[in-house]
Amino acid sequence: MTNLLNRRKFLANTATGLSGIALTSLLQEQRLLATPNDPIRPQIDPRKPFASRKPHHPEAAKRVLVIFCSGACSQLDTFDYKPELIKQHGKPLPGAEDLLTFQGKQGMLTKSPWEFKPRGESGKMISELVPQLGELADDMCFLHSLTGKTNTHGPGENFMSTGYTLDGFPSMGAWTTWALGTENENLPSYVAISDPRGTPQSSVNNWGPGFLPAAYQGTEFNATKPLGNLSIPDGVTADTDKATRNFLNRLNQQHLEKFPGDTELAARISSYELAARMQLSVPEVTDLSTESKSTLREYGADDVSNPIKAKFASNCILARRLLEKGVRFVQLFNGAYQTGGEGVSNWDGHKSLASQYSKHGPVLDQPCAAMLRDLKRRGLLKETLVVWMTEFGRMPTFQAGASGRDHNPDGFTAWMMGAGVKAPYSYGATDEFGHKAVENITSVYDFHATVLHLLGLDHKRLSYYHNGFERRLTDVHGNVIKPILA
């Protein structure tokens, strides 16, 4: 009892306690004190910028495949069944008779030109536009209540791919590979497979690194347009090429030893070394001649009657091969932007939806369904998250004076499949006409947060300090959509 009341000890304890509080406050001000909300930045060896890194928490998925239907694929003609739209066909949209959208005044409610049918044991209603994808309904987790921030294609693609409508922000794939690296040292960690007809409207913004290190930009190529400048020059033998690269490697290592703290030099050397390894790995992975005739037939890659479909099917085979080899993030585009094309090369069905979608549906359906079946058959879906998305949805009305649907960011559909998600499962809903999300309304930030969570990443703590801000894929928003997690 005497010790407790000792004045000298009391004053000493008070002094040291106050100094501890002061030190804690100082460390916090200088961002040197770890808290549960502090950023988690990957520890990257500049000599091996793509080395595999541990996630923040145990992951459900090791790899991601994003299937991006460019041009805003209509939810009402594919995956969002609305019987009331069929009943009210030809009537005004209640309460919105004078509604003006992206291209102007709206006409009447218009049912889909394609019949919806129950699919699988779940009985999920899916359109006859995509019957083979419909057969996989029991493996899919549908998000029917997505909402966006723009009704314009370029900013819409940016928003879905980067979390921002403006240019210059890192893509989902860049954030992922910066955080986690890759499982294959001979291929890019992130590959963007462009549509056979060209690039999406927002082009490289969909796979750009933004303010992250340039090494984490997606590498764009496809099955019919592989990377250029990979072949050995004429007159140079394979042995000579190998000897030259070995000699160059020795020079690089000697140069690096002279400047051990130069991380930019180390990263540049690593990038050149990867480029050299890709001379062998990329031609191998893009050479589809080793695929069996039955595989080519299953995907539709041998369909001479539809060359675009055959080329997209080859891209789907390429996507499967890249995932097999451990590429962390693969982005597969269906649809391309052409000035004045009025949707002939993508899903932008403004003027004549029926005729345009009749062309696009077969291009997407068989190849994509075959790829998903193939991934499942090979056991790859156990560790791969597949995401299907588009930049926004479509109106339940046809435009005044046209036979197509206008842009609609107020309620649209995406789906996931594979590692970590419930299936069959449907989350959220639009109203009875498919116009606006009304049940479990979901933002793109929530969508991105969930993808990162399934990869073992905390979207609130994966950040990069840039221009005075802690930047995240989800900005300052987003919550993991926990009900869809397996």
Image (tube, grey):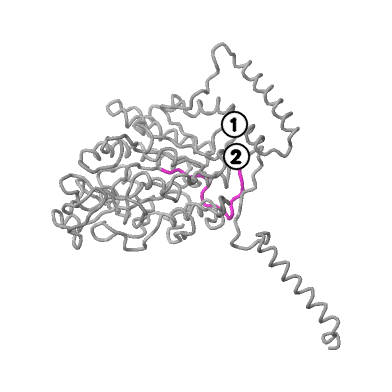
Label 1 neighbour load within 10 Å: few <14, some 14-19, many 20+? some
Which residue matches tag 2? 50
Magenta span: 52-66
Left or right: 267 in relation to 372:
right
Q: Residue furthest bottom?
A: 1
Residue type, numbered disc 1? Leu
Residue 246 in the figure: left or right of residue 81: right
Q: Residue 45 placed where, x, y %?
A: 66, 42
Q: Which of 97 and 91 is in front in this view?
A: 97
Classify residue 146 as left or right of residue 30: left
Q: Is residue 61 highlighted in magenta?
A: yes
Please tell me which residue is depicted at 68% across the width and 67% down the height of the picture: 25
Q: Tell which of 228 and 417 is nearer to you.
A: 228
Could you say which disc has been placed on residue 274 in the image? 1
Residue in the image at 26% along x and 57% along y: 435
Q: In which quarter of the image is residue 348?
A: top left
